[in-house]
Amino acid sequence: MVLAHTGRAEVRDVARQCVKSLTTHGIAVRLLPDEAADLGLEDVDGLVETTLPDHLPGEGCELVLVIGGDGSILRAAELTHETSTPLLGVNLGHVGFLAEAEQEDVESTITAIVRRDYTAEDRLTLDVRVLVGKEVLFSTFALNEASVEKAARERMLEVVVEVDGRPLSRWGCDGVVCATPTGSTAYNFSAGGPVVWPEVEALLMVPLSAHALFARPMVVAPTSVLAVEVLANTEGSGVLWCDGRRTVDLPPGARIEVRRGARPVRLVRLHQAPFTDRLVAKFDLPVEGWRGAAERRRRDGGDHDGGEKDA
């Protein structure tokens, strides 16, 4: 399946190139009807089919090739969450932290798909539900984060946060972000939360502009259950956002529960580059002057770990 942000001409060009390359190799491609029309690819030698977004579009597909930015990958995760279809992102956005390939890598990416020369890794997700009293008002999932935020600029949100069924602290704040390691470089990062390597299984909670002495980012076990209760006497109402895509209004007294998701999202990897290298590349971090352990051993004339000198 191919999903693309067809509102941009550059993305449409790359998407057409990908679909035509895949069909040339005899690989059938599935598209959403609106995107197929935007690309002018309703049918290519009988190898292009369309399906509606609410018809499990990823079912039966080997992978989903996502062309766009991180927002497009989050949209793809939403459309394919029930089928756990692996997602392979080609970044035509800005940072593109979730994407595996850049625009200049399209040809090699298609080759890897044809040869099945890739792996898929599971990324921890969040299951989120909103309760008012005993009634479940809303439930969904998130790959990056679930954020409870104030609905009005001029009003603070009064909340009590809870971990594993025990109250932790009360905050007057702009909101609270509950994030995954995958989302640690997204809203969590902007809010001052820690960057967590994706191999680490954990849940993160970060207060937003909290008026409190204890208002630090927290990392808890993946088995923990986080909860944010909007106090019944709060003057401001709130809103819940999941991955910046799915939202629901939060009345006073609402309770938001966040736990590890039952179903992970699978991201395709074409190469096994360390996450450190991804951080350096995506954030353009300064690493000039780094020599590395091997160079230091050569410089110092020995192996600090007691091993032999480098040849």
Image (spheres, rainbow, N blue to C red):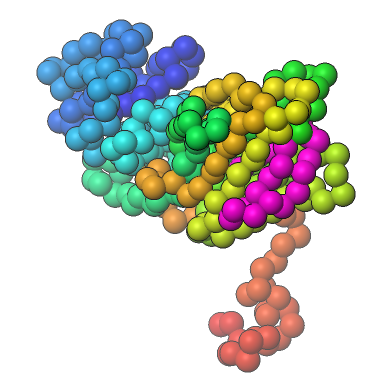
Relative to 123, residue 72 above or below: above
The structure residue drawn at horizontal position 48% and vertical position 31%, both measured from the top left corner, is 135
Residue 38 in view of the camera: yes
Relative to 213, residue 98 above or below: above
Relative to 6, residue 233 above or below: below
Residue 10: image x %, image y %?
47, 17
Q: Residue furthest left?
A: 46
Q: Is residue 88 left or right of residue 132?
A: left
Residue 47: image x %, image y %?
15, 22
Q: Quadrant of the C terminus?
A: bottom right
Q: Is residue 237 left or right of residue 274?
A: right
Of residues 23 and 203, the one nearer the viewer is 203
Q: Residue furthest front?
A: 133
Of residues 59 and 152, the one nearer the viewer is 152
Of residues 87 and 238, the one nearer the viewer is 238
Of residues 249 and 144, the one nearer the viewer is 249
The structure residue drawn at horizontal position 52% and vertical position 53%, both measured from the top left corner, is 198
The structure residue drawn at horizontal position 65% and vertical position 30%, both measured from the top left corner, is 253
Q: Is residue 305 left or right of residue 89?
A: right
Residue 266: image x %, image y %?
38, 45
State which region is magenta: 159-178
Residue 212: image x %, image y %?
85, 44
Residue 175 in view of the camera: no
Q: Quadrant of the N terminus?
A: top left
**Main SS of residues in magenta:** strand
The structure residue drawn at horizontal position 48% and vertical position 49%, both measured from the top left corner, is 260
- Does the magenta portion include 70? no
Q: Is residue 309 left or right of residue 262?
A: right
- Does the magenta portion include 168? yes
